[in-house]
Amino acid sequence: MDFETKMKELEEIIRKLESGQAGLAESMELYEKGVRLSAECSALLEQARQKIVKLVEDNGQKAELPFSPNPES
């Protein structure tokens, strides 16, 4: 399951829990699934963040450096 699908499922779980229509047992199952999906989404985001690279010129050759959200000026 990809990130977007996991997020849609997580949003649906949140809607169900917020509606108050689920009983206690179903709410607990939904909550547990939501926690798992949230952790999986966070892990996917972290993997994506780590893969982002910035190409820079270094003496005429390109070098890959880890992404930095605050590049040096």
Image: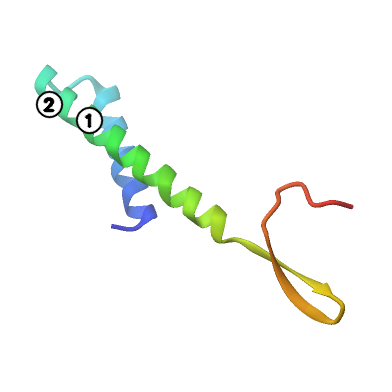
Amino acid type, label 2: Glu
- From this viewpoint, which residue is outermost toward the front? 59
Closest to the camera, between mark 1 and mark 2, is: 1
Residue shown at 38% from the left, 54% from the top: 4
* Viewer-proximal residue among 6 and 19: 6
Quadrant location of the N terminus?
A: bottom left
From the viewer's perspective, tell me whether residue 31 is left or right of residue 63. left
From the viewer's perspective, tell me whether residue 21 is left or right of residue 39. left
Amino acid type, label 1: Glu
Residue 65 image offset from top left, x and y in percent: 70, 63
Residue 72 image offset from top left, x and y in percent: 85, 51
Asked if 58 appears above or below 39 in the picture, the reply is below
- Compute the Cα span from label 1 to label 2: 10 Å
From the viewer's perspective, tell me whether residue 46 is left or right of residue 60. left
The residue at which mark 1 appears reads as 32
**Tag 1: Cα neighbours inside 10 Å, few (<14), some, or many (≥20)?**
few
- The image quarter in which residue 17 lies: top left
The residue at which mark 2 appears reads as 26
The way the protein has been coloured in the rendering is: rainbow
Residue shown at 48% from the left, 54% from the top: 47
**Tag 2: Cα neighbours inside 10 Å, few (<14), some, or many (≥20)?**
few
* Viewer-proximal residue among 65 and 15: 65
Residue shown at 36% from the left, 38% from the top: 38
- The image quarter in which residue 16 lies: top left
Asked if 26 appears above or below 33 in the picture, the reply is above
* Viewer-proximal residue among 38 and 26: 38
